[in-house]
Image (cartoon, rainbow, N blue to C red):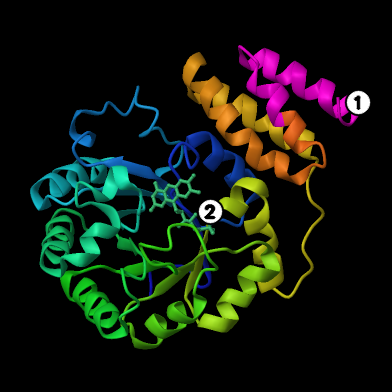
């Protein structure tokens, strides 16, 4: 495996959420080995300025994987080539997004239907970057095990270094329980490392995924937004230690607000904070109320004063 840490822990790509500020927050608790960017549109990347684009911003490229989305091999190669010059840890190709705005262009999980084109895309990106290359895929459309194995073999032959499997089909969307048994199945037959993804809800649960599927790493999305210290706890459990106490949540939210403010212009910062807060607020009995109160704030200072007020009174 070489380049991929043992029991690799990855933060998932999430539009409007796996940005530079959330990544910095999570990095501060340690434990997360690799951070995926939000998906980046391969048509836009060539004209994006890394100093001004909120999507391209980063602090530490050494643990960052840029995820690109698209279906045109030439465009994907051009986007990957540009991102490669920023010396990230790696590049990922999105073959998992199921949203209509993505699949209607033939991107994301729609690429899984066209094995020839998917191979051309991977080969084109492979040609341009010497860095670790992953594909994040789903279980396709129909849970056809033969097709899944053909697809995984094609990815390997086309040059991917490892594969992330979100254990749902395109039609599942985000509904029903993730089908971890398919991660185990793919792992059993794959020549490259497999990162399992889907529904991990605690540090202990991440260990369950390792044990039940034999995967080489896990990727966590939503639960990492709710408990950004989850990777630290998984590392402790993997080392046979007990997980640490959770940090003070009010401080976690304040820290995120300052990080967001540091990295984004005021209007973008406000939007990002309002998108992030409901996830962290899930830890609180008054979380729903808190998100509602904060959603009316007109600036980051107001967000913080409303936040402190809510915490002081416990609910209102
Ligand atoms: C708000 C949101 C945005 C997402 N954006 C992306 C994305 O940009 N690229 C991608 O491959 N997956 C995206 N996903 C899917 C996640 O990466 C992950 O596969 C999914 O949430 C399942 O993992 P989880 O159960 O740990 O959250 C997104 C998911 C959510 C909830």
Q: Quadrant of the N terminus?
A: bottom left
Query: Which is the main secondary structure of the residues drawn in magenta?
Result: helix
The relative height of residue 152 versus residue 278 in the rendered view (above or below) is below
Classify mark 1: residues with Cα within 10 Å, few (<14), some (14-19) or many (20+).
Answer: few
Residue at point 61% right, 57% down? 31
Whether disc 1's CB lies below 8 Å from ligand 1 is answered no
Say what secondary structure mark 1 lies in.
helix
- The residue labelled by disc 1 is 313
Calculate the distance from the C-alpha at mark 2 to the C-alpha at mark 1: 31 Å
Q: Position of residue 252 (x, y in %)?
A: 71, 37
Classify mark 2: residues with Cα within 10 Å, few (<14), some (14-19) or many (20+).
Answer: many
Q: Which residues are drawn in magenta?
A: 291-316
Along the polypeptide, which appears first: circle 2 or circle 1? 2
198 sits to left or right of 205: left
Residue at point 24% right, 65% down? 112
Residue at point 23% right, 51% down? 107
Q: Is residue 131 visible?
A: no
Q: Position of residue 109 (x, y in %)?
A: 29, 59
Residue at point 23% right, 47% down? 104
The relative height of residue 247 versus residue 289 in the rendered view (above or below) is below
Whether disc 2's CB lies below 8 Å from ligand 1 is answered yes
Q: Position of residue 201 (x, y in %)?
A: 65, 61
- Between 85 and 301, the one nearer to me in the picture: 301
Q: Position of residue 154 (x, y in %)?
A: 19, 75
Which residue is outermost to the right? Answer: 313
**Residue 297 lies in the magenta stretch:** yes
**Residue 131 lies in the magenta stretch:** no
Which mark, residue 221? 2
């Amino acid at each position: 495996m070489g380049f991929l840490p043992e029991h690799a822990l990855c933060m998932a790509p999430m539009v409007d959420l796996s940005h530079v500020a959330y990544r910095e927050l999570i990095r501060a608790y340690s434990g997360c080995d690799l951070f995926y960017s939000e998906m980046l549109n391969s048509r836009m990347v060539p004209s994006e300025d890394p100093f001004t684009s909120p999507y391209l911003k980063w602090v530490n490229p050494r643990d960052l994987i840029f995820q690109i989305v698209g279906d045109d091999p030439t465009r994907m190669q051009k986007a990957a080539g540009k991102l490669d010059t920023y010396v990230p840890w790696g590049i990922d190709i999105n073959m998992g997004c199921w949203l209509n705005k993505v699949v209607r262009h033939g991107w994301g999980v729609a690429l899984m239907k066209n094995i020839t084109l998917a191979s051309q895309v991977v080969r084109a990106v492979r040609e341009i970057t010497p860095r670790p290359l992953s594909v994040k895929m789903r279980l396709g459309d129909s849970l056809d095990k033969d097709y899944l194995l053909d697809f995984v073999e094609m990815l390997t032959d086309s040059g991917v270094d490892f594969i992330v499997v979100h254990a749902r089909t395109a039609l599942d969307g985000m509904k029903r329980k993730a089908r971890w048994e398919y991660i185990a199945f793919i792992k059993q037959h794959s020549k490259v490392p497999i990162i399992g993804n889907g529904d991990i809800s605690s540090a202990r649960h991440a260990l369950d995924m390792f044990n039940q599927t034999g995967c080489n790493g896990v990727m966590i999305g939503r639960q990492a937004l709710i408990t950004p210290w989850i990777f630290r706890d998984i590392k402790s459990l993997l080392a046979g230690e007990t997980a640490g106490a959770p940090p003070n949540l009010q401080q976690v939210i304040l820290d995120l607000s300052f990080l967001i403010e540091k990295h984004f212009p005021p209007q973008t910062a406000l939007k990002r904070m309002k998108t992030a807060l409901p996830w962290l607020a899930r830890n609180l009995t008054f979380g729903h109320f808190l998100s509602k109160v904060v959603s009316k704030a007109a600036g980051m200072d107001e967000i913080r004063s409303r936040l402190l007020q809510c915490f002081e009174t416990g609910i209102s």
